[in-house]
C-alpha cells in the first residue's frame, strides 16, 4: 500500500466489513516490497516505481488513499474469488 498506514486501515476495515477472511493488508514503502505481494495499491504517481519492484503483482493506482473508490473494486474482486 505504498507507505499509507491510513489507507491500509481504510482497506482493512472495508474487507472486514465485507466479511472477507484470510486477506492480509500491509503497508510498506515501495523500497521494501519483497516481490511476494499479490496486489499493490499505490498513489498514482508511484505506481510505475512499484511495478519495477514487483512486476508480477496486480497494481491498483489511487489518487487519494483515504476515499479511493478503487477500494470497493478490490473488495468486490476479493468477494468473487
Image (cartoon, grey):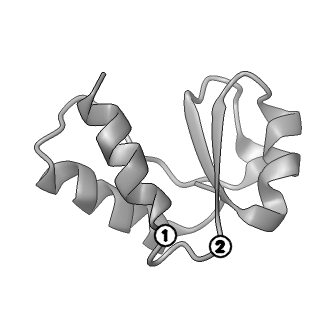
Vertical placement of residue 58 versus 14, above or below: above
Question: Residue 38 is drawn in which quadrant?
Answer: top right
Figure quadrant of residue 62: bottom right
Q: Residue at image x 18%, y 33%?
A: 21
Residue that appears at 65% across and 73% down: 63
Residue at x 66% of width, y 28% of height:
57
Left or right position of 57 against 48: left
| Image location (x, y in percent) of residue 53 | 83, 35
Q: Quadrant of the N terminus?
A: bottom right
Q: 81 or 8: which is nearer to us?
A: 81
- Badge 2 crowding class, 10 Å Cα cut-off, few under 14, some 14 to 19, many 20 or more, is few
Locate residue 52 relative to residue 24 in the image: left or right: right
Residue highlighted by disc 2: 63
Residue 43, x across and y down, in percent: 69, 65
Circles 2, 1 touching at the beta carbon (< 8 Å): yes
Q: What element does badge 2 sit on?
A: loop
Dot 1: element:
loop
Residue 38 as seen in the image, left or right of residue 25: right
**Where residue 5 sits: x, y (%)?**
49, 68
* Residue receiving disc 1: 68
Which quadrant does the C terminus fall into?
top left
**Distance between the Cα atoms at labels 2 and 1?**
7 Å
Mark 1, residues whose alpha carbon is within 10 Å: few (<14), some, or many (≥20)? some
Give the residue at x 47% y 48%: 26
Q: Nearer the viewer, residue 12 or 81?
A: 81
> Which mark is on residue 46?
none
**Front position in the image: 15 or 26:** 15
Residue 31's spot in the image, x, y percent?
81, 48
Asked if 56 appears above or below 61 in the picture, the reply is above
Amino acid at each position: 500500500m505504498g507507505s499509507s498506514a491510513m489507507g491500509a486501515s481504510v482497506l482493512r476495515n472495508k474487507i472486514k466489513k465485507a466479511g472477507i477472511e484470510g486477506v492480509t493488508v500491509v503497508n510498506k514503502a515501495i523500497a521494501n516490497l519483497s516481490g511476494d505481494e499479490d496486489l499493490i495499491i499505490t498513489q498514482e504517481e508511484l505506481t510505475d516505481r512499484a511495478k519495477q519492484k514487483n512486476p508480477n503483482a496486480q497494481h491498483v493506482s489511487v489518487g487519494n488513499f483515504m476515499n479511493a473508490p478503487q477500494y470497493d473494486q478490490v473488495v468486490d474482486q476479493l468477494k468473487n474469488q
